[in-house]
Image (cartoon, helix red, strand yellow):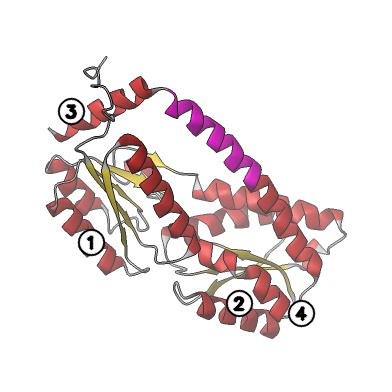
């Protein structure tokens, strides 16, 4: 078992270390929270961390990843939003001695599809499936005609892994409730106003829509306002809030888990030592 030398008085376990987070995301509420969490963790453990926001531009994200590798950090966390685009960049970084982990989105085949050291995040398919089960079961209890229901799902980038896999999970849930009508909506990138306008326009043009879901953070954030703009039934908004409430409980459980981890500095030191062994 790897162990780390005892820390000097006042020394933090990550002092002198440098990490990068590379994401397809942009300057929006979701990634603002992620960035703040990263900075809080960096301060807690005494290391330096930076985030690269690519604005949903895959080529730009890859360029920023190359720049991150060139800066020779102690580790890189990357959002793997394509099954093909990240295979070689990740392999090259690992070959250069830089640990790389996946975060938020993963290769559809997991470790068999990408050689990242690990993945931190949820199963995208399962996330969509659980959301669908909750939404459709609630609708069934309310007497919604599921046999003739139409499901729409908005995504900032419909072809990105997160949208494809989450919609796969939703469709799996649809099958269990006998729902056959589905359409993916192009939210138009990461601009909030554009997403809201497109979702609203779709709802107005498709009054047969029974369910509207968001695949990504920006689309989901604009759902409530879009539903109101289109004059859709308030019960759909209420269902979304119910699901959000359960999500808050999950976050609370996660926070409790993180608190327990924070109390064990020796375990953190072991993790850092493993990273050092991989890098050097």
For the residue carrying disc 4, how many other residues have a C-alpha within 10 Å: few (<14), some (14-19), or many (20+)? few
The segment highlighted magenta reads 248-263
Marks 1/2: CA–CA distance: 31 Å
Foreground of the two, 65 or 131: 65
Is 257 part of what is drawn in magenta?
A: yes
In the image, taking residue 86 as reference, residue 205 lies left or right, namely right
Mark 3–mark 2 CB contact (< 8 Å): no
The residue that disc 4 covers is 231
Q: Residue at x 49, y 59 (%)?
A: 30
How far is disc 3 from disc 2 in space, using C-alphas? 48 Å
Whether residue 109 is visible to the viewer of this picture, yes or no, is no
Q: CA distance from mark 1 to mark 4?
A: 42 Å
- Left or right: 252 as drawn, with respect to 22: right
Question: Looking at the image, do the residues carrying marks 2 and 4 touch, with CB atoms under 8 Å apart?
Answer: no
Left or right of 99? Residue 243 is right
Q: Which mark is residue 64?
A: 1
Numbered mark located on residue 199 in the image:
2
């Amino acid at each position: 078992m790897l162990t780390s030398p005892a820390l000097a008085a006042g020394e933090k376990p990550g002092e002198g270390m440098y990490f990068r987070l590379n994401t397809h995301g942009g300057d929006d509420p979701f990634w603002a929270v992620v960035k703040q969490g990263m900075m809080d963790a960096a301060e807690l453990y005494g290391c330096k961390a930076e985030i690269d926001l690519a604005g949903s531009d895959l080529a730009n994200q890859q360029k920023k990843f190359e720049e991150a590798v060139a800066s020779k950090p102690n580790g890189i966390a990357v959002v793997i939003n394509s099954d093909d685009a990240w295979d070689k960049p990740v392999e090259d970084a690992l070959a250069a001695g830089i640990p790389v982990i996946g975060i938020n989105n993963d290769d559809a085949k997991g470790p068999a599809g990408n050689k990242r050291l690990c993945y931190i995040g949820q199963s995208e398919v399962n996330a969509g499936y659980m959301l669908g089960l909750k939404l459709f079961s609630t609708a069934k209890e309310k007497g919604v005609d599921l046999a003739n229901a139409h499901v729409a799902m908005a995504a900032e980038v419909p072809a990105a892994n997160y949208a494809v896999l989450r919609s796969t999970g939703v469709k799996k849930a649809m099958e269990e409730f006998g729902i056959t009508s589905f359409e993916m909506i192009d939210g138009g990138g990461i601009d909030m106003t554009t997403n809201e306008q497109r979702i609203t326009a779709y709802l107005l043009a498709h009054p047969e829509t029974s369910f509207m879901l968001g695949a990504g953070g920006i689309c989901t954030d604009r759902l409530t306002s879009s539903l109101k703009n289109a004059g859709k039934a308030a019960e759909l908004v209420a269902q979304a809030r119910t699901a959000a409430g359960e999500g808050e409980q999950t976050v609370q459980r996660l926070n409790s888990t993180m608190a327990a981890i924070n109390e064990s500095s020796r375990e953190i030191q072991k993790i850092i030592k493993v990273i050092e062994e991989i890098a050097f």
